[in-house]
Image (cartoon, rainbow, N blue to C red):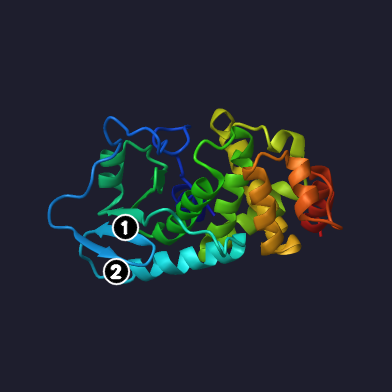
Amino acid sequence: MKKIFFTLLLCCGCVPVPSGAPAEDPGRAAVASPYRGLDPGYKSEETAHFALNMYSSANTALYPAMCEADYTRIMQDLGLYSFVPARPYNVVIYRDAQEYRTKTGQPDWSGGATYGNALLLFEGDGLKASMSHEMTHLVFNEFMGLSQSAELRWLNEGVAVYEETRSNQVSASYYTALTAETIAPNPIPFSQMVNLAPQNESRHNVDRWYTQVGSVAGFMIRRGGSFNFSVFLSKLRDGASMDSAIAGAYTGSWKKLSDVENSWLLDVKR
């Protein structure tokens, strides 16, 4: 379990640059990029939705296909069939964790980060999980608006954790075990979940929070359907309150967040 925990801790490290702030405001150009690119000799490749920069290795032929597969699944799961990103997402894959941390300034536990429309990763065992997690943030941030309310952080992280588990069996097993061990016996009340600031909490509470928000987001997508989830996101983006967005998207099922909480509690305690 300790080995799996260490691996997943890296995979889930999604600290935007600068830490704690939303992605770059497209209306204001940054004075300087907060991260440095790859060393000379890297290769570039473009796909339908991504512009990748990476070093040549035995795995680089797989990375463009991995990006497109993740993108397709995320769009389908979130029901964003008609959403078209403004421009291709930039993907930078560093040689290893040391180069990633040196050139991005990210902490030791970070496995990936987003900035503006850039996805910053490094080669290693956690790459697949990190790619899905951070790519979900890119899509969510752009669709919802880069200046989205901090009140939606739980939802942003929730869909990212859910998509990580969809792409990686190690992540799926890890979060399934944590849900059974720490969430089902003692769920975090939603009134606390939506306001919790994980970076200020103990490691135990941070892990519980990420596990629960991933479980809740996944439950809403699976139980309510991808189309209704996209309507829910659209209403939030347009300024509706959480309860109003739920009532408008899930007619006949849920009228407010407490209804979602009650349904989710029944499901998670089975």
Quadrant (top left, top right, bottom left, bottom right) of the N terminus: bottom right
Q: Position of residue 209 (x, y in %)?
A: 64, 41
In depth, the one of 199 and 40 nearer the eye is 40
Location of residue 230 by image quarter: bottom right
Considering only vertical position in the picture, is 76 above or below 255? below
In depth, the one of 121 and 186 nearer the eye is 121
Dot 1 falls on a residue whose secondary structure is loop
Identify the residue under disc 1.
Answer: 123
Would you say 36 lies left or right of 249 here? left
Would you say 213 lies left or right of 124 here? right
Within 10 Å of the Cα at label 1, are there few (<14), some (14-19), or many (20+) other Cα atoms?
some
In depth, the one of 171 and 159 nearer the eye is 159
Would you say 116 lies left or right of 186 here? left
Please give the label number shown on residue 197: none
Within 10 Å of the Cα at label 2, are there few (<14), some (14-19), or many (20+) other Cα atoms?
few
The amino acid type found where label 1 is placed reads: Glu
The amino acid type found where label 2 is placed reads: Asn
Residue furthest out toward the left: 40
Q: Earlier in the sequence, mark 1 or mark 2?
A: 2
Would you say 115 lies left or right of 38 here? right
Q: CA distance from mark 1 to mark 2?
A: 9 Å
Contact? badges 1 and 2 (CB < 8 Å): yes
Identify the residue under disc 2.
Answer: 59
Q: Residue at x 58, y 66 (%)?
A: 76
Q: Residue at x 25, y 46 (%)?
A: 99
